[in-house]
């Protein structure tokens, strides 16, 4: 049997790095798409996959160009394609509406078309998000829950989701979407609240700061670990019949709970250092997004291996180590 070939967009991100590790463990030939600027400044832009650079092949291409994507897909002829790249920070999507919509929907369409033309037997995974549910009319949300997005990011993902479904039904492409809830790790980008919390705790512990300002401390999130969620992505493409799956823990915690766990891990009292600042509140946080992953458990055999405490502890330990602080477990 020939070696399987995987193509990953967004390979330099949190999910892409964990997915690349998983695919290499399973003896895939792994190809990733990056901007040319990343190849010119690897120390700054390839940090999450630095340890994998000898085992994967990177291709400079642009998600904004069909010709660019077509060229890469035609060269690789992948057996599996994971489309993870997107403009993904919700707050930024409000400020850059046109760019977010164009980038996320256009890139998905270009990639689907390139795969259809060059590698029609390739199995495609699309990274959806719980933000597609937005002002959901029911909790928890499942695969049949109506999408009511409340951000341009969510809208762009719904449009892309429909594109994937259209290519599946019209062109019989083996294309599946994962509707993933919040998933974190020590590799999370610094602008996300979980990374802000653990970094803030580490900086306070090291004497580099005295307080941490956050938005709505009572906002609830269904938080899982990225390593668990990329395993679900892979499982989707191993199914004979393509489909869409909600991936979530089914348990929510407040931002306050995350703070308390992280600061306690750092040997600090969160109440002494956390300040709730109205400038960081988002209206859309009023809706509880909690996923029902029953279908993924039944069909894929997937279940998370990390619980909330283990996730927060791992992130906090990594942040502490980055500042030279070590707290006994």
Image (cartoon, rainbow, N blue to C red):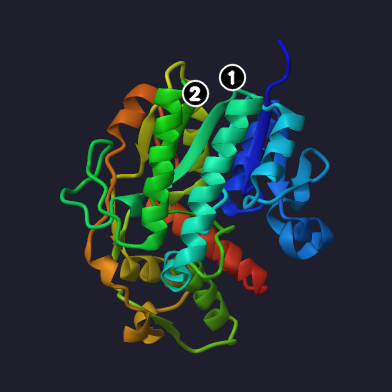
Q: Residue placed farthest to the left in the image? A: 137
Residue shown at 49% from the left, 61% from the top? 100
Residue 271 located left or right of residue 236: left
Vertical relation: 211 (above or below) 328: below
Q: Which residue is mark 1?
A: 121
Q: Position of residue 237 (x, y in %)?
A: 51, 26
Residue 167 located left or right of residue 16: left
- Where disc 1 sits, the SS reads loop
Q: Residue placed farthest to the front in the image? A: 67
Residue shown at 36% from the left, 55% from the top? 155
Q: Position of residue 74 (x, y in %)?
A: 72, 30
Residue 308 located left or right of residue 218: right
Regarding residue 304, the answer to whether it shows in the image is no
Frontmost residue, 34 versus 312: 34
- Of marks 1 and 2, which one's residue comes earlier in the chain? 1
Frontmost residue, 289 versus 322: 289
Q: Position of residue 163 (x, y in %)?
A: 43, 38
Frontmost residue, 74 versus 35: 74
Q: Which residue is mark 2?
A: 174
The reply to whether dot 1 and dot 2 touch (C-beta < 8 Å) is yes
Residue shown at 45% from the left, 74% from the top? 95
Which image quarter holds the N terminus?
top right
- Where disc 2 sits, the SS reads strand
Vertical relation: 191 (above or below) 300: below
Give the spatial CA distance, label 1 vs label 2. 7 Å
Q: Position of residue 73 (x, y in %)?
A: 69, 34
Frontmost residue, 280 versus 135: 135
Vertical relation: 254 (above or below) 306: below
Residue 217 located left or right of residue 163: left
| Mark 1 residue crowding within 10 angstroms, few (<14) / some (14–19) / many (20+) | some
Residue shown at 32% from the left, 73% from the top? 282
| Mark 2 residue crowding within 10 angstroms, few (<14) / some (14–19) / many (20+) | many
């Amino acid at each position: 049997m020939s070696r399987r070939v995987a193509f990953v967009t967004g390979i330099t991100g949190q999910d892409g790095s964990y997915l690349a590790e998983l695919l290499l463990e399973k003896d895939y030939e792994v190809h990733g798409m990056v901007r040319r600027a990343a190849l010119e400044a690897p120390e700054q832009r390839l940090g999450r996959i630095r340890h994998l650079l000898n085992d994967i092949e990177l291709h400079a291409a642009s998600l904004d160009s069909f010709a660019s994507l077509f060229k890469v897909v035609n060269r690789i002829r992948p057996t599996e394609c994971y489309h993870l790249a997107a403009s993904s920070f919700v707050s930024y999507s409000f400020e850059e509406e046109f760019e977010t919509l164009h980038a996320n929907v256009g890139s998905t369409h270009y990639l689907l078309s390139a795969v259809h033309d060059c590698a029609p037997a390739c199995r495609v995974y699309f990274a959806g998000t719980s933000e597609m549910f937005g002002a959901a009319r029911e909790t928890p949300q499942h695969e049949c829950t109506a999408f009511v997005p409340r951000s341009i990011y969510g809208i762009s993902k719904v449009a892309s989701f429909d594109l994937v479904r259209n290519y599946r039904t019209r062109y019989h492409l083996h294309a599946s979407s994962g509707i993933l809830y919040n998933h974190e790790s020590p590799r999370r980008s610094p602008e996300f609240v979980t990374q802000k919390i653990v970094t803030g705790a580490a900086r306070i512990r090291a004497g580099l700061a005295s307080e941490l300002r956050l938005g709505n401390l009572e906002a609830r999130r269904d938080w899982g670990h990225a390593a668990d969620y990329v395993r679900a992505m892979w499982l989707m493409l191993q199914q004979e019949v393509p489909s869409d799956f909600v991936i979530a823990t089914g348990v929510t915690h407040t931002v306050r709970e995350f703070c308390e766990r992280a600061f306690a891990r750092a040997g600090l009292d969160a109440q002494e250092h956390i300040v709730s600042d109205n400038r960081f509140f988002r209206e859309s946080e009023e809706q509880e997004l909690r996923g029902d992953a029953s279908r993924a458990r039944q069909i894929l055999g997937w279940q998370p291996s990390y619980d909330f405490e283990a996730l927060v502890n791992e992130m906090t330990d990594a942040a502490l180590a980055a500042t030279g602080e070590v707290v006994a477990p």
